[in-house]
Amino acid sequence: MKFLAVASKLHGEGYLGGLISKLSDSLRELGFSLETFLADISEVDKIDINEVPIIFILTGGTSRLIRKISEKVKGFPIILVSHPYHNSLPSALSATSRLRVKGENLIIHFHVPSFGKVHLERIVKIADLYEYIKSLKVVVVGELEKKEIESFERISGKVQTIGIDVIEERLKNVKIEDYDLRKVVEKIDITGSDLSLIKGPLSLYKVSKELLKENEANAFAIDCFPFIVKYKFTPCLTLSLLLSEGIPAACEADLRSLILLAVAQNLTKAPGWIFNPSDYHNNILIGAHCTVAISLTTYATLIPHFESGNPYAVSGTLREGTYTIAAISPDYKILAAARVLVTASGTLSGGRCRTQVVMRLEEKDPRPFTEKAVSNHHVLIKGDVLDYLEKIAKILGMKFFNY
C-alpha cells in the first residue's frame, strides 16, 4: 500500500498542518506512514506507484490532481478517501465519476467522518486483504482445466499444478516419527482410530509442506477423489492441519473456495471451513464436509470418510454464534454471502459428510436458498464480515450478492 494525501494550495497551512498531523498519527498507529503529500500537479511526476494507492483527499480543488496521479497507476485499483469538510467529498465525487468513465482503473471510494484510526483501520484492512489475495501462490496436487487456472489468476495469484502420480515416491519415502503422531494426538481425539492409518495423511501433510516450500507457495489444494482412489486414504486430516496453521488449503482442487479461505484467514486470523449445503428448509441450512480445521473446533475426532469409508475424515464441533457464509460463482463473476447463526454442529447424522453445521440464514432475497445459491461449495467464516466481502468483491471486479 502507498499512502498519498492531496490538497489545494488555496487552503491555509494551519488547517492543512493539523489535518496532516492527525492523518499521519492515525497511520502510524496502524503501522504505516504517509509517504507523499501532493499539493502541486507538477509533483506527480516525481512519484512511483507500484502498489495499491490510498489517496486521502484533504480539500477540494484536487480532482485534476487525482486524475493525474491515476495515470501513474498500472494494474492496481485506486482507493480514494474523503472526509466531510473543506470540499473533500465534491472533489472525490468529481474524480471518481471522471475516472470511472475513463475506465482505466478500478476506483473505490470511501467517505469517512474523520481521519481517526478507527475509521482508517477498515480501509487499510481491505487494501491489505486485496494484496494478500493477489499474492497467493497455490500448489495444486491434481489436474485443472486451463480455463479454471486462467479465471483464478485473473483475480488472484498464480497456480502450480503437480500430478497425483508425481508424489507417489515422496509419500513412500516420508518418515513418520512419534512426535508427528503426538502432534495430531494433542489436538484431536483419536479414540477408536488406528494409529497406523493416520500415517498416510501425515505423510501427505509432510509432502504438502515440502511442496509449498519448494515452490515458494503460500496456499494448497488437492483433487481429492482421484487421490483417494489411488492411495486409499483421504487428504481430509492433511488439509485440516494446514488450515490450522494458517495456510489456505482447499479440497477438491476448488480454487474459488480457496480465495475465500484466504479471505477468512486474513480477516479473522482463523481458518474458514469449506462445506456443501446438505439440506435447507425455512431459513435453516445444514452444511457438511470432512475437512474442518482442528483449530476452528471445540472438539474434533477422526472417523471413516463419508463417501469412501477410507481413513480418515475430521469430525468437529464449532462454537455457536454469528458467522458469515460465502461462495464464488464458477465464472468468478459473483461473490454471494449471508450472515448466519450457527446453532448446532458435530456428526449429527450418519447420512452426511462428517462435520455438520446447522445454521440459520439471514436472507435478503425472498427466493429459497436452493434457487439462488451460486455454487455448491460455500465457506464458513467466523464473525460478521459481510461488509468486507462486499468491498473485496468490488475491488476484485465481481458483483456482490447478499443472499
Image (cartoon, helix red, strand yellow):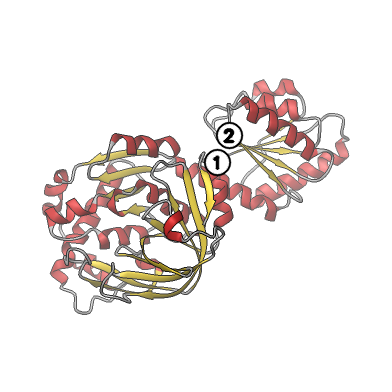
Q: Position of residue 341 (x, y in %)?
A: 50, 70
Amino acid type indicated by mark 2: Leu
Q: Nearer the viewer, residue 34 or 302?
A: 302
Quadrant where the image shows the N terminus: top right
- 49 sits left or right of 220 in the view: right
Q: Which residue is mark 1?
A: 395
Q: Residue furthest bottom?
A: 191
Name the residue located 57 percent from the left edge and 36 percent from the top edge.
52
Q: Across the whole image, how many numbered discs are drawn on residues? A: 2
Q: Nearer the viewer, residue 230 or 353?
A: 353
- 208 sits left or right of 24 in the view: left
Q: Position of residue 306 (x, y in %)?
A: 23, 67
Name the residue located 47 percent from the left edge and 74 percent from the top edge.
320
Describe the element under mark 1 as helix, strand or loop. Answer: helix
Marks 2/1: CA–CA distance: 7 Å
Amino acid type indicated by mark 1: Ile
Quadrant of the rendered structure where residue 68 is? top right
Q: Would you place residue 60 above or below residue 275 in this image?
A: above
Name the residue located 46 percent from the left edge and 54 percent from the top edge.
372
Q: What mark, if any, has residue 76 been given in the picture?
A: none
Quadrant of the rendered structure where residue 154 is? top left
Decide: few, some or many residues near mark 1? Use Cα within 10 Å; few <14, some 14-19, many ≥20.
many
Q: Position of residue 146 (x, y in %)?
A: 29, 34
Q: Which residue is mark 2?
A: 106
Quadrant of the rendered structure where residue 359 is? bottom left
Name the residue located 48 percent from the left edge and 45 percent from the top edge.
334
**Is disc 2 in contact with disc 1, using a CB cutoff of under 8 Å?**
yes
Describe the element under mark 2 as helix, strand or loop. Answer: loop
